[in-house]
Amino acid sequence: MLGIEMRLTDVSVTWRLALALAIPLVALAGLAYVEINTTFTAYQHARHLNIVSADLGVIGDFVHALQAERAEAVGLLASKGREHGAELEAARTAGAPALDKMDQVLADMKAEGDPTLMRHEQELEAVLAKLPQIRASTDNLALEPTEVFVYYTDLVHRLMNVSREFSLAAGARGVVGKMMAYSLLMNAKEVAGQERNLGHAFISEGKFDEAHYLDFVGMFGSQKSLIDQYLELLPDEDREHYRESLHTPDADAVEDIRSKMMVGGLSADLSAIDSGEWLERSARRIERLKELENETLATIVVDAQGMADEEYHHLLRVAGITSTVLTFACFFAVSLSLTVVRPLRRLTKTMNDLAAGNVEVDLIRSESKDEIGQMGRAVTEYIALAKARMVKEREEQEAAERIKRAAELEAERERAERAAEIAFAVEQLASGLDALSSGEIGYRLSNPFAPSLDPLRMSFNSSMERLCGVMATIRESTGQLHGGSQELQLAADDLARRTERQAAALEEAAASITQITTTMTSSAQRAEEAGLLVREASVTAQKSGAVVSDTVKAMQHIEQSSGQISQIISVIDEIAFQTNLLALNAGVEAARAGEAGKGFAVVAQEVRELAQRSANAAREIKALINRSAQEVEAGVRLVNETGDTLKGIEDHVMKINERVTAIVSAAKEQSAALNEISQAVSQMDQVTQQNAAMVEEASAATSSVATEADRLNGQIAMFKLPGNENRQRGREAA
């Protein structure tokens, strides 16, 4: 508790009052927010029930339209398109508005965010996407009645499941029972529709189908069970009304027809039953169920709207009460601020001014009789006492200031004397430093300082003594350094000149050797080229000898061929001679034959002339061949002589080639030796050039050292050493 009190006392009264007001205000605002939020949520939920009720109505209308469309589509397919065409189109037209509204219903289902409802929505959307294809196939009679019945039944069941899940997800107390009853009534109406279609099929066939008999038997019990559950979920005041509404003449007629059908069991003969009456009575019964379904949905809508109106008025009441309370609380806070906080702030400001020493403040005039008025009057009395005390303190302060001023004058006089002593010392030191800056290091301070400052004068004099000794030593060392550097510079210059001459000589020698090496290399190349030419000439001579030899052989062959041709010509000459004799004999025999041999005589004459021409031509050819043989023989002799000459040339070329090869080898050896000499001279030249460069660098460094020594000597000469003035003058004269 003590710790809490200490922490609270650290907070101003204004903030404590504000905190005291803020806590209930915040609590009130929080409660108001919770109440308003709860009421607004209930109002939104009621509005949401209106939306869900409208969606349930759309689903119910669409289910009813699909049930009617299913019946007509099955009838169309069963009659092979002969019947129910117009009725099917009318059913589709009646269900078109509900189908158009299903997109909004699916969107509302997504908005619920319930996982189960979203899954049903996705499945329903996928099944609805197939509806246009089913309708087109039905119109084209491309489906079986069973396939169409199964599709529409599955779609209706999915819609009824969606209606049930939608009611559970969005239901509210007092309404969810009616919503579930609405779903049960939709299921009962669906079973009634299936019963109508199945009964019509049995009556049309005149007998029961064993596969669907049990389904038909169970449909009556299913309808009764669903309707009983529907009535149980209704409010007590409405239950009897709806129970009486279900007992209609059409319902009794359907039950009577159904009883007649079940008399004979599975083997009953149904041909005596009127199918038209069954369809009409069942349709009116289903329409009555649809009317009850609409009435139930209407009560749901009325209840949801009533809940919305009630929650809306409750929201308005809560908002009005909350705003009134908050307005009153704000008015009370403003009044408290004007009557408590503002006087407290004024009083606090006055106390702060007094604490700062300002007694010239406005007196607090307060006629209120509460604690704040009492505090104001006490502060006013305190201000009067404070003013009297301030006058007394001011007089005491003036006396103390006069005493302080006298002490400060005495201290000022002492400081002036001390400053004069320091100024004298500084002046003397400045004179000594000026003498030092002008090079007079023999200057000494002879006038004593004040006792407290005299050690400074002694330190200056001793420093000047040591500086004189050091400068004398440096002067001697620089003189010796200057002389040594001059000697070293002379020697370096001499070495540099000799090195430069040697480098120039080596450079000229290297250039000469390089030129000789180049000449020898060129000579070796020319000799090598001559050797190549000689070798090529030798090869060419060898080839020429071979060609001449081949030519001789060819001439010999020509000579042999000419002899053979001469022999052939002799044979031809002999043949011509014998032909001439035969032709002559033939002419003789033809003359003997008389007239019968005239023609043969003419032929013999022609053969004889031809033989003579052949003999003449053979003799001319033989003469030509003889002359050709003589010329060939002369050519063979000349070619043989040419071959001998080329053989001699080849021998001489081979000898020249051997000499040139020897010359080339010697030239290569000389060129290699000169290259080695040139490389050695070049290396010597490079080393000499490097030595010359090093000598020049050393000479430059020596010159730089001498220059620096001269400059150092000149700097030292600025200092005037005691007893050395004459020596310095003599050195400068030298």
Image: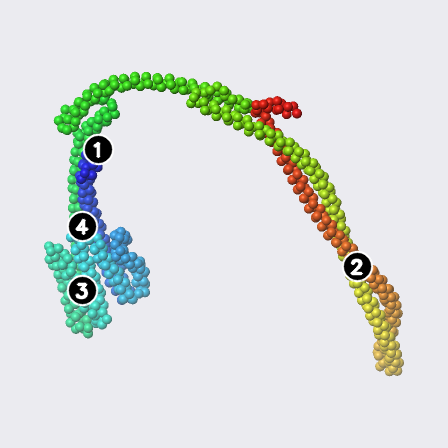
* Residue at image mark 3: 222
Which residue does the image show at 15% across and 57% down from the upper left? Answer: 233
**398 and 314: which one is in front?**
398
Residue 174 lies left or right of residue 356; in this view the side is: left
Determine the CA span between mark 3 and mark 4. Answer: 30 Å
Q: Quadrant of residue 644?
A: bottom right
Name the residue type under label 4.
Ala
Residue 219 lies left or right of residue 607; in this view the side is: left
Earlier in the chain: of badge 4 and badge 1, it is 1
Residue 61 appears in view: no
Name the residue type under label 2.
Glu
Determine the CA span between mark 1 and mark 2. Answer: 131 Å
**Mark 4 residue element:** helix
**146 and 660: which one is in front?**
660
* Residue at image mark 2: 658
| Image mark for residue 232 | none
Mark 3, Cα crowd under 10 Å, few <14 / some 14-19 / many 20+, is some
**Mark 2 residue element:** helix
Earlier in the chain: of badge 1 and badge 2, it is 1
The spot of residue 360 in percent (x, y) is 23, 21
* Residue at image mark 4: 304
Q: Are marks 4 and 2 in contact (CB under 8 Å)?
A: no
Disc number lying in front (3 or 2): 2
The spot of residue 211 in percent (x, y) is 23, 71
* Residue at image mark 1: 12
**Mark 1 residue element:** loop
The N terminus, quarter of image: top left
Earlier in the chain: of badge 4 and badge 2, it is 4
The C terminus, quarter of image: top right
